[in-house]
Image: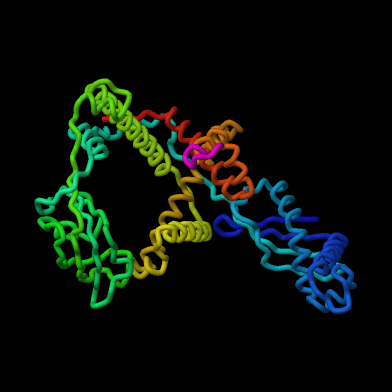
Amino acid sequence: MKVTLEKEKENVVKLDITIPAKDAVDAYNNAVRKISQYVNIDGFRKGKAPRAVVERHVGTERIKQEAIENLMPRAINQAVADNDLDLIAQPYVTDYNFNVGEDLTVVAKAELRPEVTLGQYKGLKLEVKDAAVDEDAMQKQLDRLLEQNSIQETVIDRPTKETDIAVIDFDGYSNGEKIQGGEAKNYPLDLAHSNFIPGFAEQLVGKNLNDEFEINVTFPSEYHDEKLKGQPATFKIKINEIKEKKLPELNDEFAQKVGPFKTVDELKADIQKYLDSQRERTNKTNSENEVFKAVIDAAKVEIPQSMIDRESNALRQEYVQRLAAQGINWESLVKAQGEDELLKNLSEDALTRIKNSLVIDKIAKEEKIKLEQKDLEEKFAQLGAAYGLKPQDLVKQLGQNPEIIASISQQAMNDKVRDFLMQNNTVEVK
């Protein structure tokens, strides 16, 4: 087998492959046997039809393509080994000349990993703004705890207040049609923390028990249902029950109830410890991002459009799946935002993701940073904890999907390179 290489534009190489006649004939005969195993030919059991019969039944071109597919891996492996190629995508055949009994010539093309020129990635001195804790952060945390431990008391002698919970029946109409999913019985609506249509909860304040009335609202322009975007709607309401939230008193007894604390001061100290750790984590993340951004911006790499297109398609598929999980389809998003804008954003995201990956791999190569077994074990432990699974169970579930394993390996390498960058650069928090 002979393989010659010719570099073309950007990062594409052309491979001229010559396979000796004997090897080509063997591959052709093997392809005949393989195809005959799964095609139905009248008068013959599967796998027993003569070569000439199989050729008449499926055509010689189909057999030749099967033979070439079987020969290509060896040819590509030889090309990679002989020329030290760093392929970024599976090679594809563009032409071939296959006359059984003669040498087979195949022309294939392959994309190489784009060359990355690193800028300064060590010895940087950078600054980030301190993620200072808000002055009212402590009070917000205490208020949240009190809210979580509140009790509800039924009220019968006054109208609803904006802090109440109103148990209601509602039935909605828009443009004379009933709103699908726009009705409920005995629905408890927290008037102070409603995620209903803007203006809905506010119009329930000041109403009495058993009141029946109508309210008018307008759906937001970004509402997920295309028919209801920006449309006026009317809801028929009935107040079935009014409940008042009673917050507990912030005292030592309350502190003992919500955690291993003896006093309110101990509870506050624990909250402060949480706020401080949150601030520290945010500063750490911001510092890592600042270093990584500086390193990426300093690097130079020309990324071919074919890579961007492939990554854009992969991102689109991920996006469609995430939207489907939220009950939103891609077509409705296209109508709302415009296909050109969506595709432009996907292309920009793809470009960023590709460059990040290429720069990380280049630094890993330059600094001889390699993945070890313990790195993958740590990553699986992190993912297992996030999904409530033991690492070994997660490995069993994901082990059948090489793409996911490759993605997890890339994440582990990203972590190692980020750690290296933080150890070799300085960030001052101001």
User: Against 349, is 84 above or below?
Assistant: above
Tell me residue 170's x, y (percent): 24, 64
Asked if residue 119 is among those painted magenta in the image, a careful observer would answer: no
Would you say 361 lies left or right of 90 here?
Answer: left
The answer to which quarter of the image holds residue 73 is bottom right
User: Against 417, is 157 above or below?
Assistant: below
The residue at the point 42 percent across, 54 percent down is: 349
Between 141 and 306, which is closer to the camera in this rendering? 141
Would you say 231 lies left or right of 156 here?
Answer: right
Tell me residue 118's x, y (percent): 47, 40
The residue at the point 10 percent across, 51 percent down is: 157
The residue at the point 74 percent across, 62 percent down is: 69
The answer to which quarter of the image holds residue 151 is top left
The residue at the point 76 percent across, 60 percent down is: 70
Judged from this view, the residue extending furthest toward the front is 156
Q: How many marks?
A: 0
